Image (tube, rainbow, N blue to C red):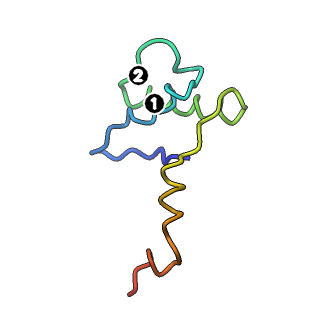
Amino acid sequence: MMSLVCHITEDCSTPLKVFKNAGAPNLVRGKLPTLVGEIHQTLSDAIDLNQQGEWMLEPDTESASDEAGIENESDWMDEN
């Protein structure tokens, strides 16, 4: 699952858009929240609904294909 941590320089609406496109019931209608507190609560509610089985987030196939290209740990580990 995608990381839900937003840094000050990042667009925190991205997880909202992903969840809305995936069909999170609390994001299907209306505008997306813009205030940090509202975004936090909306994401929390969407995660709760996901964990309750109300909706499913599709697996990230891009990450899986990226990981498939790694042959061993030395390909991505720092050698220091």
Q: Which mark is residue 16?
A: 1
| Residue linked to disc 2 | 33
Q: Position of residue 38 (x, y in %)?
A: 44, 26
Disc 1 is placed on an element classified as: helix
Mark 2 vs mark 1, CA separation in Å: 9 Å
Above or below 62: residue 23: above
- How many dots with numbers? 2
Disc 2 is placed on an element classified as: loop
Q: Quadrant of residue 58?
A: top right
Q: Nearer the viewer, residue 60 or 28?
A: 60
Q: Nearer the viewer, residue 23 or 37?
A: 23
Please tell me which residue is depicted at 49% across the width and 66% down the height of the picture: 69
User: Mark 1 belongs to which amino acid?
Assistant: Leu
Q: Position of residue 29 (x, y in %)?
A: 50, 12
Task: Say whether residue 47 is left or right of residue 38.
Answer: right
**Label 2 crowd (10 A; few <14 / some 14-19 / many >=20):** some
Above or below 65: residue 37: above
Task: Say whether residue 53 is left or right of residue 40.
Answer: right
Please tell me which residue is depicted at 65% across the width and 28% down the height of the picture: 55
Above or below 12: residue 72: below
